[in-house]
Amino acid sequence: MGLFPFCMPYFPFLNKTFPRGIHPADNKSTATIPIRRLPFATQLTLPLNQHIGKQALPMVQPGQEVVRGQPIARADGFMSVPLHAPADGVVEAIEPRPTAQGTWMDSIVLRVFDASTQEYGWGEPQDMDGLTPEGIVRAVWDAGLVGLGGAAFPSHVKITPPKEGRVHTLVVNGCECEPYLTCDHRLMLELTDDLITGIGYALRALGAERAVIGVEDNKQDAVEAIRRKLPENGLIDVQAVRTKYPQGAEKMLIHSLLGLDVPTGKRASELGVVVNNVGTLAMMGRLLPQGHGLTERVVTVTGPGIARPGDYWVPLGTPMRHVLDWAGAPGVSAREIILGGPMMGQAVASLDVPVTKGVSGILVFDDRHIPSGQDRRVRPCIKCGECLRVCPMGLNPSMLGMLAAKAEYDAMGSTFHLGDCFECGSCTYVCPSNIPLVQQFRVAKAILRERAA
């Protein structure tokens, strides 16, 4: 204890953290591999709802030829975003197709021309310096940008100044605390200029005074790369925060960087703070000056079942099977694949589902890494308290789990604050009884939403 205060000036990130949380193994072996580009598949499937909100409305017809970057679906209201053609091709169909969630969704099916290149055939450069804040919001909307950290929340909504007050700080999330994922890490290293440019656009749109980039301290190379590019006016800063899961969650990162706690039932914007992901802002800086729409994203493709792991530029709509064949996982089954990170990601329902705007990672495991039999057997809760110790929101997951087992959903919501749970999976991770707590909470939330509707 006597040494700790002495260390603090030299390791300031030791204070940049939040209470509780867990420390899963990083498994970020792809962090040192430069981003590679995936070739086009012969057919791309583009769901019309790749974002939170109303699905987009088609602007094309079957048989119509399109060029890369051309708008093919328009936004249907403020909580909706447009869709752009990821490649030159012809529209084969507009029909329901399966998605990663197991549901079928209206989709535009595009047959890619053999001669299609990575060149954009649509869009003109625009003078970003001459745009008003409202003009920047419009440009982001037209580009079809959503939160690329996985939430897929419409970006133009995020950077629209809130009616309830003024935003003073833009918090930029570069933590990437999920194991295995490294797409944000590589973007911070390779698209640093675009990131700084995108942050500048978001600051102007929000009217915010400053931006603070939070990066976990296991990515010091990214911290230094950003620090070298920071503008001299001091409006943007970068800070290392302690490596811990879920450091990248909105409320956790705000606490770590600003020392502010977002109260239950409140939004961060009500405290004058807006949080955006580094990948989203980097693409904002990359696409907007050229007048281009979002047609591709960086995806981490890794795991024990992948022969050529790494981060790849993947055209939107690319079938999962094509990605896995290219990365060296032929013959893999859907049972072995997770979209996103292992903590908050979801199992794939089919290998024929497409990569969408919200897919940050494709993790492939083999039978040796998938628990079965006795390893997966659910046992009674032993009241060990581990889930209480790690819950970043300070909830009682054990009690919530027991209430879920008895279908006492109203009590979960009104008395034990189920709504504060953001399903990080920390409780499930540490549970020695293998109780699928976070899955129970998702079911309970869905039932409560249905009752409210």
Image (cartoon, rainbow, N blue to C red):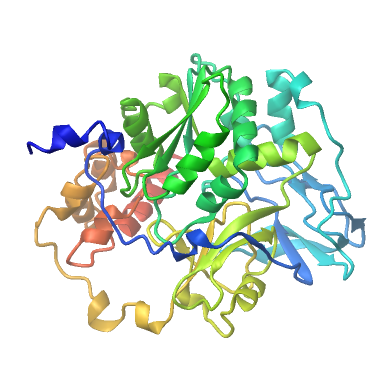
Instruction: Name the residue located 35 percent from the left edge and 26 percent from the top edge.
Output: 258
Q: Residue furthest bottom?
A: 331
Left or right of residue 13, residue 219 in this image: right
Residue 15 sits above or below residue 26 on the image: above
Give 7 or 435, whichever is nearer the viewer. 7
Above or below: residue 379 compared with residue 2: below
- The image quadrant of residue 292 is top right
* Image x and y of residue 449, in percent: 42, 44
Expressed as whole percent of the image width and height from the top left, the position of residue 411 reads 23, 42
Q: What residue sits 7% from the left and 36% below the top?
A: 2
Q: How many marks?
A: 0
Measuring from the top left, give residue 298's x and y in whole percent: 61, 55
Left or right: residue 437 compared with residue 70: left
Q: Position of residue 37 (x, y in %)?
A: 69, 63
Q: Is residue 8 above or below residue 220?
A: above
277 displayed left or right of 193:
left
Question: Quick one: quadrant of the N terminus?
Answer: top left
Query: Is residue 399 shown to the viewer in this render?
Result: no
For this orientation, the residue located farthest to the top is 165
The reply to whether residue 384 is in sight is yes
Comparing 112 with 233, the one in front is 233
Q: Is residue 149 left or right of residue 256?
A: right
Please, is residue 90 above or below residue 42 in the view? above
Instruction: Give the residue displayed 92% in from the left and 58% down from the top.
Output: 64
Residue found 53% across the figure and 82% down from its top:
332
